[in-house]
Image (spheres, rainbow, N blue to C red):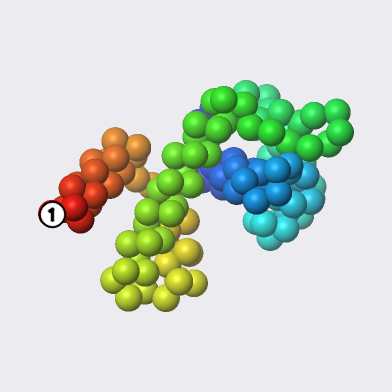
Amino acid sequence: MALTSSMEDYLEAVLMIQQRHGYVRCVDVAEQLNVTKPSVSRAVKELSKMGFLVKKTDGTLSLTEKGFQIADQIYEKHQFFTQQLIEVGISPELAEIDACRMEHVISQESFEQLRDAYNAHKDD
């Protein structure tokens, strides 16, 4: 089963919360994504089954290596597109919303080419 945009959002949220707090609870993910705790439980179960996430005995969540790689890629795309949109005059709020959409539809290869071209041009 391929990852959906929603599943990618869950992985990205776990990464972001982990970076901020050092640990991740289901309630934190629910708050971050503005979803219900039962929704988080279903997503955690599916992502765990797919090998992206582990729910520890204390109830905290952690990304597997495979999960971290996906979450990190999504988060990098999100940060890049948010920054680019803000730089061209889009409000930070709208930039966040649009970046979240864009991060899911662009392939990793296209993103890397775009990012590298931007960075090369920026350094000129």
Q: Residues within 10 Å of mark 1 (few under 14, many from 20)?
A: few
- Kindly give the residue lying farthest to the left in the view shown: 124
Position of the N terminus by quadrant: top right
69 horizontally vs 102: left or right: right
Residue 124 percent across, percent down from the top left: 13, 54
Residue under pointer 1: 124
For mark 1, give the secondary structure: loop
Residue 66 percent across, percent down from the top left: 54, 26
Residue 86 percent across, percent down from the top left: 37, 69
61 horizontally vs 119: left or right: right
From this view, report whether residue 66 is shown above or below residue 87.
above
From this view, report whether residue 86 is shown above or below residue 35.
below
11 and 120: which one is in front?
120
| Res 4 visible | no
122 and 108: which one is in front?
122
- Total labels drawn: 1
Q: Residue at x 29, y 71 (%)?
A: 88
Q: Residue at x 57, y 31 (%)?
A: 67
Residue 48 percent across, percent down from the top left: 68, 28
| Res 75 visible | yes
71 and 97: which one is in front?
71
Q: Residue at x 31, y 43 (%)?
A: 111
Q: Name the kind of residue labelled 1 in the image.
A: Asp
